[in-house]
Amino acid sequence: MGNNSSAQSFKIPAGEGPHTVGCTDLMTEHTIHGSFLRLYYPCQEDTCDEGPAWIPRREYHWGLADNLKMNRTVVDTFFSYYYGSVKCPAKWNASFKSGETYPLIIFSHGLGAFRTLYSAICIELASQGFVVAAVEHRDESASATYYLQDTAVSNAEKQTSGLQQDVWIYYRNLKPGEEEFPLRSKQVHQRAEECIKALNLMLDINDGKKVTNVLSLPFDWSMLKDSIDINQMCMVGHSFGGATAIQSLSKDARFRCGIALDAWMFPLKDEIFSSVHQPLLFINSETFQSVDSILKIKKLDSKVMERKMITIKATEKF
């Protein structure tokens, strides 16, 4: 999917914290209702596994093309050439560094993104001693995602992969004349439920319950038993993921705080704001937020809980 020279101008920075970072994927169930996430975590230093590809499969290129309303072949050729050799500076399926407890972050991606796109942020957090579960949403807001279904059921969307079949779900653009708010409101609710499901999954793992990963990767999930600090669980998201973070906080008090990176406030109904009782930090770029969006953010002001909003000068939304 590319060559080494084409990737030299773009590299994902390694984490600057004291921990070596590992990563793996976890997919549960053989239906659309399971969880799918990329886990970033402190790993054992003597592990020498190579980092995975930043964009894991060609189908994500196709989804990005759909999002951009461009030709799939053109976009695939571009991304394969320029980014096909880019690796994540995290050790693939490395052994988890047990013996400590770590704060947990559930991370929600933005519109048209997917679970690995924010690897730089997630790797940095893991290097600082966080366990980060980056959810890949299945509400048709990701550029692409998939689940594995038993081969007994056939469908034109599927592609055979061993004894299982990949069912791909691509980004859904608005239909001509379609109002945006009903779609985005429905999606943000589903996204929040997917984040809560990921939280439940990580807590089950923390309790030592057996997890079946349908991806069959060589990672020992039992090493995570008693590794999560259940008093320090945070919800983080970018853009649509920022809205998802706020929606998740309103639904589940187990999230002790939230961070919204350039939150896209449009999908949120004002009535949920009174249900958000946790501390919340907004980090905005200078050019993205409109006056209406800032006014909506200010509706989350609280005299009881700490709420902060900062804007970084000379920055743009990505």
Image (cartoon, helix red, strand yellow):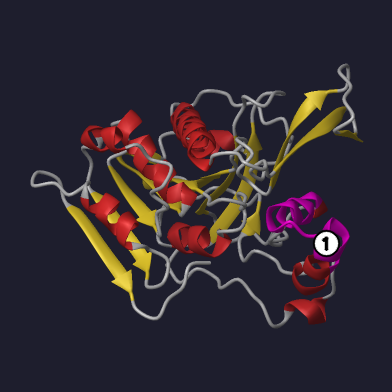
State the residue at coordinates (47%, 48%): 241
Confirm whether the magenta stretch covers residue 75: yes
- Residue 309 coordinates in the image, percent (x, y): 25, 61
Name which residue type carries label 1: Asp
Which residue does the image show at 27% across and 40% down from the upper left?
256
Q: Residue at x 46, y 72 (%)?
A: 16
Counting from the top left corner in percent of width and height, residue 131 is at: 45, 48
Q: Nearer the viewer, residue 285 or 32?
A: 285
Magenta stretch: helix, strand or loop mostly: helix
Spot the residue most to the front.
177
Residue at (79% x, 49% y) in the render: 59
Say whether residue 237 is magenta: no
Q: Position of residue 52 (x, y in %)?
A: 71, 58
Query: Few, some or many C-alpha atoms within 10 Å of disc 1 (few <14, some 14-19, many ≥20)?
Result: many
Q: Is residue 133 left or right of residue 250?
A: right
Which corner quadrant of the image does residue 314 belong to? Answer: bottom left
Q: Residue furthest top?
A: 152
The reply to whether residue 13 is in sight is: yes
Q: Is residue 264 above or below residue 175?
A: below
Q: Is residue 257 left or right of residue 244?
A: left
Q: Is residue 173 left or right of residue 62?
A: left
Q: Is residue 45 visible?
A: no
In the picture of the structure, the residue carrying the numbered disc 1 is 76
SS category of the residue bearing label 1: helix
Q: Quadrant of residue 1?
A: bottom right
Above or below: residue 185 compared with residue 48: above
Give the residues drawn in magenta, as a range: 59-77
* Figure quadrant of residue 17: bottom left
Nearest the viewer among 37 and 249 is 249
Question: Which residue is nearer to you in this view: 51 or 99?
Answer: 51
Pinpoint residue 23: horizontal percent, then vertical percent: 60, 52
